[in-house]
Image (tube, rainbow, N blue to C red):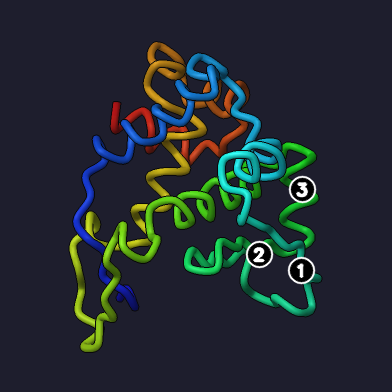
Amino acid sequence: MAEYIAKPTSRMKIRNFANGIREYLEWYDEKYFPVVEFLELVIPQLEPDFSYEIVPVEEMKHQYGLTYPDEKLICLREDVYEKAAEGTARDRFTIAHEIGHYFMHRPGELVLARNQNKEKIPAYQDPEWQANTFAGELLAPPQIITGLTAKEISLCCGVSLDVAKIQLKNI
């Protein structure tokens, strides 16, 4: 059960937002989205108050990344950051996921409410689904993956086979 409930957001709105980022950066047709470069160089240019921290594994333990939109901060576990920089699909996705939280779940832009009763909520109101959807759409959007197999998508976009299959299913 989700701990938080977010304002309802459709896959199409998330896709348009992710593609808007790609268009703005003139990376619309880039097969391999440079997510680490985006984190390190682009977001700080867009938002001078933004920062990210690389946190030792022993401090984050079982958390791969955490985002604090109100503080304009993304924290990434050190091994996740390093593997993403090396091109590991899961870790690239984790960074894109945290970037999704950063942009979509800000105070005043997307109202988050605690799910006090721990009720099952629809996916489109789940902040984790929204961030996962953003990551998939940013890293493997339809204009790049149409006509490709899941394996081809995985290789050219730097995503896992699971992400490739989900993206193909949702073209």
Q: Nearer the viewer, mark 3 or mark 1?
A: 1
Question: Reading the chain from its start, which is encountered first: label 3 or label 1?
Answer: 1
Q: Which mark is residue 55?
A: 1
Amino acid type for the residue under numbered disc 2: Cys
- Callout 1: few (<14), some (14-19), or many (20+) C-alpha neighbours within 10 Å? some
Q: Would you place residue 156 above or below residue 90 in this image? A: above
- Callout 3: few (<14), some (14-19), or many (20+) C-alpha neighbours within 10 Å? some
Residue 18: x, y in percent? 41, 34
Position of the C terminus, as image quadrant, is top left
Amino acid type for the residue under numbered disc 1: Val
- Measure how far apart labels 3 and 1 are at the Cα level: 14 Å
The residue positioned 76% from the left and 48% from the top of the image is 83
Q: Looking at the picture, tell me which residue is in the foreground, 98 or 91.
A: 98
Q: Which mark is residue 26?
A: none
Does residue 89 appear to the left or right of 97 in the view shown?
Answer: right
Q: Looking at the picture, tell me which residue is in the foreground, 66 or 108.
A: 108
Residue at the outermost front position: 48
The residue positioned 38% from the left and 15% from the top of the image is 146
Q: Would you place residue 166 above or below residue 112 in this image? A: above
The residue to which callout 3 is attached is 83
Residue at the outermost top position: 147
- Measure how far apart labels 2 and 3 are at the Cα level: 15 Å
Does residue 72 appear to the left or right of 117 in the view shown?
Answer: right
Amino acid type for the residue under numbered disc 3: Lys
Residue at the outermost bottom position: 117
Q: Would you place residue 93 above or below residue 113 in this image? A: above
- Asked if disc 2 and disc 1 are in contact, CB closer than 8 Å, the reply is yes
The residue to which callout 2 is attached is 75
